[in-house]
Amino acid sequence: MSTAQLITTPFSFESTAAEVAAAVDLSGKRAIVTGAASGIGVETARALAGAGAGVTLAVRDNARIVSVSSSGHLRSPIVFEDINFDFRPYEPFLAYGQSKTANVLFAVEATRRWAHDGITANALMPGGILTNLQRHTDPERMKRAREQSGGKIRFKTVEQGAATSVLLAVSPQLEGVGARYFEDCNEAQTLFKRGEGPFAMHGVAWWALDAAIAQRLWDESLLMLERTLE
């Protein structure tokens, strides 16, 4: 018979996962929780995250992809004939707009391909937030854009800017919903013409939600990847 002393803890039958993890600082740690779609896996993941860990959920079901786009997508559709500006003069805001259109189209095609597996994707405009994203942007150009917008350009705090992303990730209203575009925590209206001019700040362009364009961009992206790996 072993004479080793049994380990005892201050916890018991009634203890919860959150109580066990409360006194532990898991900041900087990474946890992977399998079976986190339901049952004790969900609570395990919640307790670890509450203690500061970065948590990855390895699940088969309740998966959501959140694609961060921008109202800048209204500046440009995907120009398939010259995606990389090989033949056009390079214009930063057009290039940015095209890339943000691509973010929305990714959500459309990902949902089409994977919705039957319970995986959906939605895109969003977080709002104007002053972060490191603007560190390479000419301040004078930003100032002119704000002036020319007639006050339409407004800024959020980073806490407000993260709200729509979190909504898409956790809201029960989004269960099984994909291929949509949201702004300010609500689904945006589809725009079929410019209407508001080059400084439109709200709505989603029809070209960003078109299923045929989304499929074409996906196929083109795969070809680009193949060429890169050759």
Image: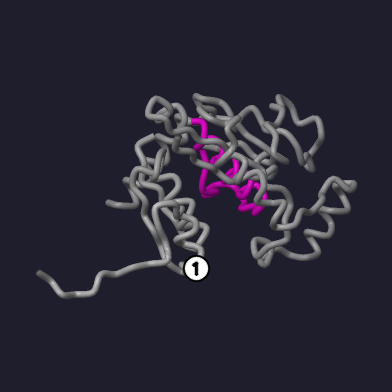
- Residue at x-position 47% and y-position 30%: 111
Closest to the observer, 125 or 136: 125
The verdict on residue 98 being magenta is yes
Residue 178 seen by the camera: no
Secondary structure under tag 1 reads loop
Q: Residues within 10 Å of mark 1 (few under 14, many from 20)?
A: few
Query: Which residue in the protein does label 1 denote?
Result: 23
Which quarter of the picture shows residue 78? top right
Write down the region rendered in magenta: 81-108
Closest to the observer, 45 or 178: 45
- Residue at x-position 69% and y-position 51%: 161
Colour setup of the view: one colour
Residue 88 seen by the camera: yes
Closest to the observer, 135 or 96: 135
Residue 16 image point, x, y percent:
46, 53
Residue 216 image point, x, y percent:
45, 31
What secondary structure is the stretch in magenta mostly built from?
A: helix
User: With 174 as the anchor, is 26 left or right in this view?
Assistant: left
Q: Quadrant of the N terminus?
A: bottom left
User: With 126 as the anchor, is 170 left or right in this view?
Assistant: left
| Mark 1: amino acid | Ala
User: With 133 as the anchor, is 107 left or right in this view?
Assistant: left
